[in-house]
Image (cartoon, rainbow, N blue to C red):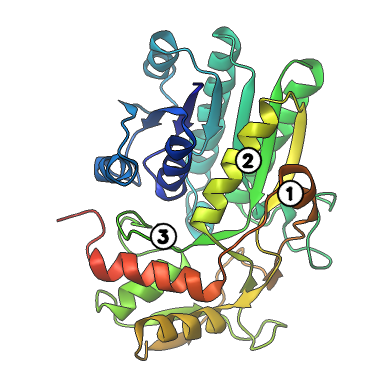
């Protein structure tokens, strides 16, 4: 079976994708530096699947250390998750985002070229659309970013487009995904951010278990159903499955393609909050705060292309996402830490 290198494979989306890959029968090699993840997630992936993975603790920005992965393994395809990923933080420390996200990808492409690997699935983001002129958002929309995190994703997309243009034998899929939430139904793996969460759902669940006092809702004066920001939330297991379908496509010699991965439905912050209260069965305190820099009002996907060309369709709804997120949090109040 083919060997798949997953950079950032110990992270939230990466670990769930490793489950899908192992269950599909792929051999999985993980490269991760644990900057926002831990080894325990990989142990639990192996527990869920009953299968083992090769693992390298390596920073993809360290070329020589990263090269060892390629020297010791025949890599048939790469799924590239590794990178810094918080919109708000990227506004505060932009150069760290440029350095980390761009250098790691340049190293990866160079090593893939050097060791004869032609297949890549890149973890991009809906942030490349900026503040869209309309919704739903199609892959053909103009690209315009509003924060450094999104700018790194767009720069990498542009680099890969240029690379594929002159290297017709390369198969590259750019997956622009929207807002992954939820957790594996087993409750063994889920989102475990360092410190105070940057993302909505872990902030809600940590408030629900008492680790945080109150959910901060950033802005209630957007032009939306209730004034709070609207996003396309997708279950992380649906998203992980989308990566397996993308691999099928790259192995069929697709050239370069771009796909949105979302549900096509938008939910506001307060609608997600209400769904989480339903999942856990009690009230969760929240407080309206100032808007965050770089945030936009509404963002949800048109998923027609992914459905027609990959066969991708999300199967979990918002209640499922909140149920599984709460199941993970209540069974792992400190995440992967004992």
Distance of label 3 from label 2 (alpha carbons)? 20 Å
Given residues 46 and 94, the one toward you in this image is 46
| Secondary-structure class at tag 3 | loop
Quadrant housing the C terminus:
bottom left
Q: Nearer the viewer, residue 70 or 317?
A: 317
- Residue at 35% of width from left, 47% of height from top? 36
Which residue is tagged 3? Answer: 183
| Residue 82 in sight from this viewpoint | no
Residue 80 shows up from this direction:
yes
Q: Badges 3 and 2: C-beta atoms under 8 Å apart?
A: no
Q: Secondary structure at mark 1?
A: helix
Closer to the chain start, of discs 2 and 1, is: 2
**Residue 310 in the figure: left or right of residue 92:** right
Residue picked out by circle 1: 306
Mark closest to the chain's N terminus, 3 or 1 = 3
The residue where tag 2 is placed is 245
Question: Nearer the observer, disc 3 or disc 2?
Answer: 2
Considering only vertical position in the picture, is 303 above or below 212? above
Check disc 3: other Cα within 10 Å, few if <14, some if 14-19, many if 20+: many
Q: Are marks 2 and 1 in contact (CB under 8 Å)?
A: yes
Earlier sequence position, callout 3 versus callout 2: 3
Query: Is residue 123 shown above or below 277?
Result: above
Q: In the image, is 52 to the left or to the right of 109?
A: left
Instruction: Say which residue appears at 72% left-offset and 83% top-offset.
Output: 223
* Extreme-left residue of the structure: 338
Height in image: 46 above or below 59?
below
Q: Where, by quadrant of the figure, is residue 53 drawn?
A: top left
Residue 58 percent location from the top left of the image: 35, 26
138 above or below 204?
Answer: above
Foreground residue, 50 or 80?
50
């Amino acid at each position: 079976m083919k060997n798949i290198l997953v950079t950032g494979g110990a992270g939230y989306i990466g670990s769930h994708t490793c489950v899908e890959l192992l269950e599909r029968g792929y051999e999985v090699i993980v490269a991760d530096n644990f900057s926002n993840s831990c080894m325990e997630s990989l142990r639990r992936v192996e527990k869920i699947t009953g299968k083992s993975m090769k693992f390298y603790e390596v920073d993809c920005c360290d070329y020589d250390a990263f090269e060892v992965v390629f020297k010791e393994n025949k890599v048939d395809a790469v799924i590239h998750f590794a990178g810094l990923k918080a919109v708000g933080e990227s506004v505060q420390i932009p150069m760290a985002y440029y350095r980390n996200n761009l250098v790691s990808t340049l190293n990866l492409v160079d090593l893939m070229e050097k060791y004869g690997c032609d297949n890549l699935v890149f973890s991009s983001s809906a942030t490349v659309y900026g503040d869209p002129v309309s919704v739903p958002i199609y892959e053909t929309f103009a690209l315009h970013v509003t924060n450094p995190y999104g700018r790194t994703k767009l720069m990498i997309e542009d680099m890969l487009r240029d690379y594929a243009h002159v290297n017709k034998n390369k198969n590259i899929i750019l997956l622009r995904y929207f807002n992954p939430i939820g957790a594996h139904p087993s409750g063994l793996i889920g989102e475990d951010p360092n410190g105070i969460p940057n993302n909505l759902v872990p902030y809600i669940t940590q408030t629900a278990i008492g680790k945080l006092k109150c959910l901060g809702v950033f802005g209630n004066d957007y032009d939306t159903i209730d004034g709070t920001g609207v996003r396309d939330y997708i279950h992380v297991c649906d998203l992980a499955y989308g990566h397996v379908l993308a691999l099928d496509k790259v192995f069929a010699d697709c050239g370069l393609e771009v796909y949105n991965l979302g549900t096509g439905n938008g939910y506001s912050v307060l609608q997600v909050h209400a769904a989480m209260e339903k999942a856990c069965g009690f009230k969760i305190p929240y407080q309206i705060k100032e808007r965050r820099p770089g945030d936009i009002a509404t963002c949800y996907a048109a998923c027609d292309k992914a459905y027609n060309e990959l066969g991708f369709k999300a199967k979990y709804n918002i209640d499922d996402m909140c149920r599984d997120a709460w199941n993970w949090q209540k069974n792992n109040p400190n995440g992967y830490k004992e």
